[in-house]
Image (cartoon, rainbow, N blue to C red):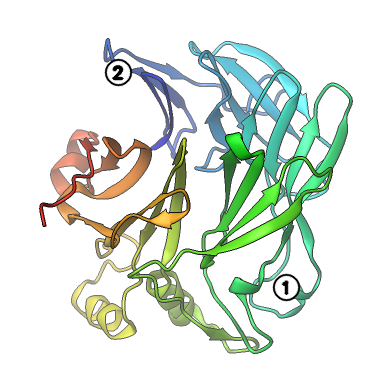
Amino acid sequence: MLVDKNEERLLLFNRASNDVAVMDLDSTEISIHSNFGQDDISHGKINDVNLFFLSDSIYGVSSSNKINMYGLKGNYIESMRFDNYTVAPISNFKLVNDSIVYYVRIPEGNTGRLEYYEYPSEIVVKSNIKSNQESSLVRFPQKDLFTKDYFHPYTYNHFFGFFETKNELFYINSNGANMYVYDLLELHGKLKREVKLNLDYYNQLEIEFGATTDMEESIAQAFCSPIIKGVYTNESNLFVVYKEGFSRDFIRRYADEHEGFPYTERPQSQYYISYFLNEEKVSRDVMIPKEYGEVKFIESADYILSKKYPTEESDLNGTTTYYVLSLTKKNE
């Protein structure tokens, strides 16, 4: 699975083996690394929020209290350690210089209970790995995730990045509807503004607190919830990738017609890209044809990487197809 891109290299991992692969796009050479294990120089299980490039020549894999650093050939370099008090891994980390790391500290608790939202948590943390000093910049949750009566499922992911020319950090929740922009010049971050994303095909699912949730309902929520899957920036450009939620009627029909649902058979989700320039939407959201699958990375409007949905043939061959797409403006 593709998780990151840096210059002309892709960073991927195998969910079954926890191997990491670095692919050079110029030479098409692929280097596969098996560092999964229990000792200090090994890493644990990998997912799509704990494996990223740290520089042109180093990638990192995080656990609950450290980030192991590896070279492009898989050689262990060193570990950065953090005072993280949750069991969840340090996620979505970004190394901005040789001493400063920003990362997400994932809150613990039951997202289906009001108490989860009533006690704010420190969600985005700035850490100086040389002085061991940390400061929180973003408090979670935001008001676009719940009311006193209901919340928006499903499992939350936390996206942040930088508007470097303005000394600002932005935060977007995978189940939210707004972007929150903070002042980086303030020690603990000061909220400067909220920006409504106004995503065209993003209808948040509302679930009442205390509602009974059996297996069937959990599956329905997972497929009926729209989810923001990625947020990417390039200078003044911001790209928000999201998938549209299915209707409950569609999921019921699909389940009736496909015996393997939801384990071996799943409907193909519809993905969209919302494109912003200087925080203003450029156009209506762009639908990605399902033949191109799901968007995995955006470098610019002219370089969008998508992953084709697997087929029976690709599963047998053990192959994955990626496409390079671009956004083009239609003539009026």
**Residue 78 position by quadrant:** top right
Identify which residue is drawn at 69% across, 37% down: 102
**Residue 20 percent location from the top left of the image:** 47, 26
Looking at this view, name the residue that lies furthest to the front: 332
Gap between marks 1 and 2 measured at Cα: 44 Å
Identify which residue is drawn at 62% across, 13% down: 76
Task: Name the residue nearer the viewer: 253 or 317.
Answer: 253
Q: Secondary structure at mark 2?
A: loop
In this picture, residue 327 sits left or right of residue 171: left
Q: Is residue 31 above or below residue 178?
A: above
Image quarter of the C terminus: bottom left
Image quarter of the N terminus: top left
Q: Which mark is residue 203?
A: none
- Disc 1 residue type (three-letter): Tyr
Label 1 crowd (10 A; few <14 / some 14-19 / many >=20): many
Q: Secondary structure at mark 1?
A: helix
**Residue 115 position by quadrant:** bottom right
Identify which residue is drawn at 29% across, 78% down: 251
Q: Which mark is residue 117?
A: 1
Q: Which residue is mark 2?
A: 25
